[in-house]
């Protein structure tokens, strides 16, 4: 089976540019305090190495994860499906997704309100 190509990392970009990982991070996140020349050099190497920020890593490092988890004990009680519908409706207005579980380890995810669980 062929190996997946390995994505370049901020460390790869930093090494190629002769700057710190923090400098690369500042360029990626468009922070102030980086000279125009360094910013151009880092962006050129990012393009050359086809650098793509890893969204999963960004979430783990403290960026906002737009997901709400809802675990309910039962769908037979009419309260819980109503609760889930309310959470889904509110989440959709905030461009968030919901993850629902009706029983242990059965999980579904959606990016918009779905059919009721009842």
Image (tube, rainbow, N blue to C red):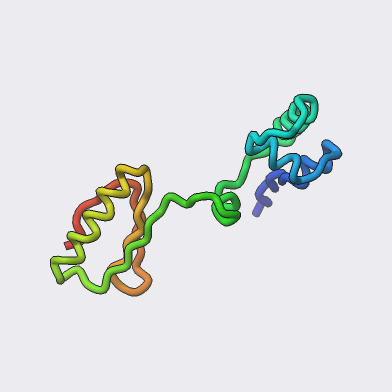
Asked if residue 88 is positioned above or below residue 50 in the image, the reply reads: below
- Which residue lies most toward the left here? 78
Residue 7: % across, % down? 68, 45
Q: Is residue 48 left or right of residue 55?
A: right
The picture quadrant where one finds residue 80 is bottom left
| Quadrant position of the C terminus in the picture | bottom left
Residue depicted at x 35% and y 44%: 94
The picture quadrant where one finds residue 48 is top right
- Which residue lies most toward the right here? 18
Residue depicted at x 37% and y 57%: 68
Q: Nearer the viewer, residue 76 or 6?
A: 76
Residue 60: % across, % down? 57, 56
| Quadrant position of the N terminus in the picture | bottom right
Asked if residue 50 is positioned above or below residue 56 in the image, the reply reads: above
Q: Is residue 115 left or right of residue 3?
A: left
Residue depicted at x 32% and y 49%: 91
Residue 106: % across, % down? 34, 68
Q: Is residue 6 left or right of residue 93?
A: right
- Which residue lies most toward the front here? 33
Q: Is residue 73 left or right of residue 94?
A: left
Residue depicted at x 37% and y 50%: 97
Q: Nearer the viewer, residue 55 or 107?
A: 55
For the image, the number of numbered tags is 0
Residue 62: % across, % down? 56, 54
């Amino acid at each position: 089976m062929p190996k997946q190509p390995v994505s370049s990392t901020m460390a790869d970009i930093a090494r190629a540019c002769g700057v710190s990982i923090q400098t690369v991070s500042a360029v990626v996140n468009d922070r102030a305090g980086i000279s125009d020349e360094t910013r151009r050099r880092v962006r050129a190497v990012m393009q050359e190495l086809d650098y793509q920020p890893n969204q999963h890593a960004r979430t783990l490092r403290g960026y906002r994860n737009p997901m709400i988890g809802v675990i309910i004990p039962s769908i037979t009680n009419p309260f819980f499906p109503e609760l889930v519908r309310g959470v889904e409706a509110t989440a959709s207005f905030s461009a968030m997704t919901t993850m629902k579980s009706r029983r242990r380890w059965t999980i579904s995810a959606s990016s918009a309100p779905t059919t009721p669980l009842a």
